């Protein structure tokens, strides 16, 4: 899936992505690949896999910058 980061919560090492379909998806810093969590910022285009989570609902896994989109 693709989307854009809408929020980075550094104190909790997590954030949210607005998926291309409009849904808001949680991600944890441990799922970020190819870039350090500290360098993430709002509006970056990312690709990820949506995985089920029985406790909190779907979450993003394998989050990495979308190389097909020019990021700031």
Image (spheres, rainbow, N blue to C red):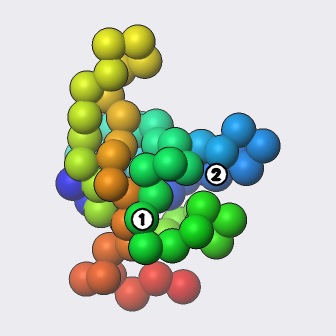
Residue situated in front as seen by the camera: 44 or 54: 54
Asked if residue 65 is positioned above or below residue 31 in the image, the reply reads below
Q: Position of residue 70 (x, y in %)?
A: 39, 87
The residue to which callout 2 is attached is 8
Q: Position of residue 9 (x, y in %)?
A: 69, 45
- Residue 66: tell me if it is visible: yes
- Image position of 11 (left or right of 34): right
Mark nearest the camera among 1 and 2 is: 1
Q: Secondary structure at mark 1?
A: loop
Q: Residue furthest right?
A: 11
Tag on residue 33?
Answer: 1
Name the residue located 46 percent from the left edge and 58 percent from the top edge: 32
- Image position of 21 (left or right of 19): left
Q: Residue furthest top?
A: 55
Residue situated in front as seen by the camera: 44 or 53: 53
Q: Quadrant of residue 62?
A: bottom left
Asked if residue 27 is positioned above or below residue 52 in the image, the reply reads below
The CA distance from mark 1 to mark 2 is 15 Å
Q: Secondary structure at mark 2?
A: strand
Name the residue located 47 percent from the left edge and 43 percent from the top edge: 27
Give the class, few, some or many, for how many residues have Cα within 10 Å of label 1's Cα (few <14, many ≥20).
some
- Residue 3: tell me if it is visible: no
Q: Position of residue 33 (x, y in %)?
A: 42, 65
Asked if residue 27 is positioned above or below residue 56 in the image, the reply reads below
Q: Residue furthest front?
A: 30
């Amino acid at each position: 899936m693709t989307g854009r980061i809408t929020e980075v919560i550094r104190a909790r090492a997590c954030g949210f992505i607005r998926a291309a379909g409009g849904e808001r998806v949680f991600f944890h810093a441990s799922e970020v690949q190819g870039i350090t969590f500290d360098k993430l910022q709002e509006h970056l285009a990312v690709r990820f896999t949506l995985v089920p989570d029985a406790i909190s609902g779907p979450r993003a896994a394998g989050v990495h910058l979308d190389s097909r989109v020019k990021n700031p």
